[in-house]
Image (cartoon, coloured by chain):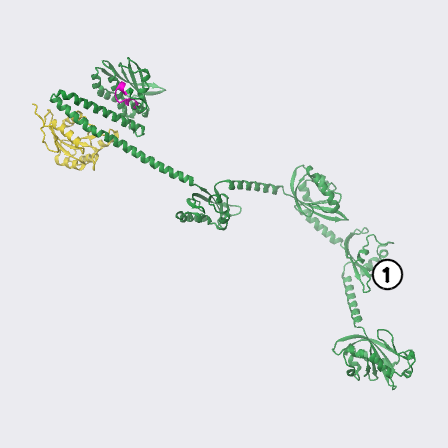
Amino acid sequence: MRASRNLTRSRLDRGAGVPRNHGGEVARILIVEDDADNQELVTRFLRRSGHEVFLAPDGFAGVAAAREHLPDLILMDLGLPGMDGWEASRSIRNDPATAQIPIIALTAHAFTQEVNRAVAAGIDSYELKPIVYQRLMQKIAEALGS
Amino acid sequence: MADNNIDSIPVLENSQGVFRSGCEENSCPSRCQRTLDERTLCEQSPAMGFVLRADLTIQCASRYACRQLGYALEEVLGQRFLELTHPSDRSLTSHLLLSSLRRPGETVQGESRKRRSDQSLLWVCERACASTGEDGVPVVVVAWEDITERRQAAVQIRDSQAQYGAIIEALDGHVYVCSADYRIEFMNRELIERTGRDATGELCYAALHNRTSICPWCVNDRILRGETVRWEVQSPRDGRWYYCVDTPIRHADGSISKQAIIQDITERKQNDQAQLRGITDSAQDAILMMDARGNISFWNPAAEKILGYTREEALGQNLHRLLVPMRYMAAHTAAFREFARTGQGPAVGRTLEMSARRKDGHEIDIDLSLSAVQVDGAWNAIGIVRDVTERKRAALALEQSEEKFRQLAENIREVFFVVDLDTRKIVYVSPAYEQIWERSCESLYRDPWAWALAVHPDDAGEARRKAATRFEGQPVSQEYRIRTPGGVEKWIRSRSFPVRDDSAQRNRVVGVAEEITEEKRYESELIRAREMAESANHAKSAFLATMSHELRTPLNAILGFAEFLELEMEEQKAEHWLEDIRKIRRAGSHLLDLISDVMDLSKIEAGKMQLEPSRFDAAAVVAEVAVSAEPLATKNNNRLSIESAPVEVLADRLRFRQCLLNLASNACKFTKNGEVRIEQSVVEREGRPWCQVRVVDNGIGIEAGDLEKIFEDFTQVDGSISRKYGGTGLGLPISRRLMHMMGGDITVESALGQGSAFTLWLPCACGPAAT
C-alpha cells in the first residue's frame, strides 16, 4: 500500500516519519554523524526501511545516546569532532550495557590500517563514503538479522 | 900664613873633598901656621871638613858641612864631634880619631854613619889627620866624603848577588854568564862539575862546547839586542833534551852580558811525551800531523779507526793523495802550497766540514780542525778529524723532518698549535692563525689566552672553560665563534689532545683549529631546507588528506540524495525524472572515480602512497573482483569466467584488488556480447615463481600505437585516450604504478578488433599457499 510521503526535510526526531516496512525488522538505530547532509540522508534511508532513528552529532553524545537508548545498531562516523569515532566505539564496547550493540563504521578512509584500528576498537563492519545507501541497507539488514 | 909659598897653600885634591894640607908630605906640624887659613878654608871649603881639638870638640867646621848636616855654624862650634856620629858607630869613630892623634900626620880613614840635625843618617868615608894647631895644641882635621849612595849600591849589589847566587844554586840546571866577547864571567857549581873546571875567563864556545869558533846556534847577537831567547834542544852528544833560556844582563857600565840557563828536561819531555801519547792514543777523534812536504808524520789510533789506514800504512804517505776525494784534490793542493809557504790558509785555525776518503773507498763526512806549527822553521799542520757522518745524517733527517713539518704547518689552512702544559705557554702556532684570527702569532706567543679575546661573548665562557680542561690532560673538542678585528664573524672548531714525549718527559698538548664558517652556514641551510621540506611535506600530506576529504564531502550529498531521489522516483514511477536523476548519479559516480584516481595519482607522485603489504591468497581477490565486475559484464552482455588456483602473495591487498578490478572493468566495458576471462596461475620467470593474473577479452582491442600511451597518466597525454576509451584515463597508469610499487608489473597484448589480454604480475610469497 503506497502512501504519499512528505519529502520535506526532517530533523532530529524520534519516529516522526512514516515508517515504511520493507518486511524486515523494525530496529532502533543510533546514527553518530556530525555532517548535516549525511545525517539527513542516512535518516531518510533508514526511515524508508521503517527503522527508528536516533541522532548524535559527536562522540560524547553518541556514547551517551547509546547508553540511554540502547539501540539495536549504531552507525558510527569515524571522523568526528572531539572524541572521534574510534574512541566512542571503544567506550561503547567497554560499557557492558552497550557492549553487544553492533556498530557499523562510516569512513572516508579505506586504509587497512584504519580498518584494523576500527576493528580493534570493536567495530563490526564498515562502509566507505560516499555511501551507496543500498549497500548500507543491506549491511544493516545482515547485522540485524544475525 | 907665614909662608906664602904656593906649595904650602892647602889645596883640594879632588872632588871627593879630601882635605889635605899642602904639607902632608913633610908632615911637620911645627912648620904649619894655618890657623887663619884653616878658618878661611873651613868657611869656604866646598867640602865637609872639621877641625877638632884634642878633646874632640869641634873647633871649626866648614859651612858646607854645617849645611849638609843642617846646623848653623854656631850650633856646632864647641860641640863634641862624636855627637854627630850615629851612636852605634861612635866607638868606631872615636877609635879612628884617637889613632890619628897617636900618629900625627898620618891619615886614617873609616866609614861610619853620621846623623843630621833631622836625625837622618848619611854614610861617610871619614878621613882624619892629626896636626898641630896655631898654639901648638894638637888638632885633628877631619874630612868627610858622602858615600851614602855608594854604600847603598854596594849593599844592593851584595844583596842581589847573594840572591842571584841563591837562585842559581837552587836552579836545577847549568848557568853561566858570558860577556859580549864570549868570555865566561860566571859558572854555577853544576856547570863547573860538568865541565870539570871553573872556566871563568875562558871563551865560552871553547870551554863549554870544545869549539874553536862561535857556535852556529849562538844567539848572542839577539841577547845583546836585549832579547830573551828560549828554546828546547836535543843534545846530539847524549840525546837528552835541554831547555835553554838566554837573557841579557845589563851592567852598570852599560855593558851587557848573557846569562844562559840550561835545564835537562829529558824526563819531563818523556813524561810530557808519554802524557801526550796517552792523550792522542785515547782520543776519539783522529789526530794527524802533516810535515812540511805534505806527508803524514803522525797518526793516532783513532785515525786508524776513522780513516781505515794503519799507522804503518799512513806514515810517510802524502796526506792529500791518501785522504782527499779526487774532486777536491786541486783545491787542496793549491791551498797546501800556500800553507807551506806562509802557514796560513782558509782552513788554518778553523773547523771545516769536508769529505774524506777512507781506505775502503767510502767517503765520509768529517769536521776538520787545522792548526799550524813551525818545526825547524818549516810549517807543519796538525789536524783533528771527527767523523760526522752520523751527525750529518741525523741533522739532515731532522732538517727534512722539520722541513716537512714546516711545509705542512705553514701551508695547511688549519691552525696547528702546540701548548706546553708545564709552562702553559704556546710552543708553536702555525701561520694559519694569522689568516684566520687576523691577529699576529706573536701576540699568542706572548699571551697564550690571546685567542680567547676574539671569541664571541656568548661563547667565550664555555670556550675558556673547556680549553682550561686541557691542562688536566683532557682531550678537548669544541666549536665557538670568533670576531676578527675587522668585525667578521667566523665559526671555529678546535680539537686538542695531550701527547707525552717519553724521551724528554715533556707534557704537551697538540691541537688543530679550523674555520668551519661555511660548514656551519651550510649546516644551518640544510637544517632550514630540511625543515622547509618537512613542513612542505606535512603541508602536502595535509593537503592531500584535506583535499581528499573536501572533494568527497560534496559528493556525499550529490550521490546520496540522488540515490534517494532515484529510489523515490522508481517507486512513484516518475519515469520522466528518473533518467535525469540517473544521469546525476552517473556523473557523480564518475566524478568520484576521477577524484579517487587523481588522489591516488597525487599520492603516488608525492611519494605519499603508502602500501600496506600483507600475505593473502590472490585467488580470493580474483573471486571478489569477479563478483564486483559481474554487473558490468552483464550490462554489455558479456560472459565472465574465472580460473584460479590458491597462491600466496605478499602485497597490498586493497591495491591489488583495485588494479584487478580496473582491468576487469575495462574488459567488460570494451567488450560487447563477448567473453571476459580472468585466469590466475603461477608461472616461472627468471627462475622465480610469479603469480600471473590474465584478464582476457575479445572486445574491440587497442590500437598498436596506443599500447604504451594507455599507461601514461594524463599529464603526458592529451585527453584523447580517455575520450577514446572512456573512463578517467588514469586507471591503467595508476595500476601500473601500484603494481611496480608492489614488485610486480602489468603487461598487455592486444590487437585492434581482436580483443586484449592484460596481465598482472606479482611475485609469489612462497609456493602455492595452503589456505
Q: Nearer the viewer, residue B404 or B726?
A: B726
Instruction: Provide residue B484's location: percent of width, then percent of height.
Output: 45, 46
Where on the picture, by quarter, is residue B727? top left
Q: Is residue B132 above or below residue B295?
A: below
In this view, A50 is above or below B668: below
The answer to whether residue B664 is left or right of residue B451 is left
Q: Colour of chain A?
A: yellow
Q: Is residue B219 above or below residue B148?
A: above
Tell me residue B567's x, y (percent).
Answer: 14, 23
Q: Position of residue B508 (x, y in %)?
A: 49, 47
Residue B617 shows up from this direction: no
Quarter the C terminus of chain B occupies: top left
Q: Which residue is mark 1?
A: B201
Q: Residue at x 80, y 56 (%)?
A: B222
Q: Tell me the SS state at disc 1.
A: loop
**Is B193 in the magenta?**
no
Instruction: Specify the subunit that label 1 lies on.
Output: B
Image quarter of the N terminus of chain B:
bottom right
Does residue A59 appear to the left or right of B112 in the view shown?
Answer: left
Q: Which residues are magenta?
A: B722-733
The one nearer the camera, B741 or B85, is B741
Rendering colour (chain B) = green
Badge 1: how crowded within 10 Å, few (<14), some, or many (20+)? some
Drawn side of residue B244 relative to residue B755, left or right: right
Question: In this picture, is B184 found above or below B380?
Answer: below
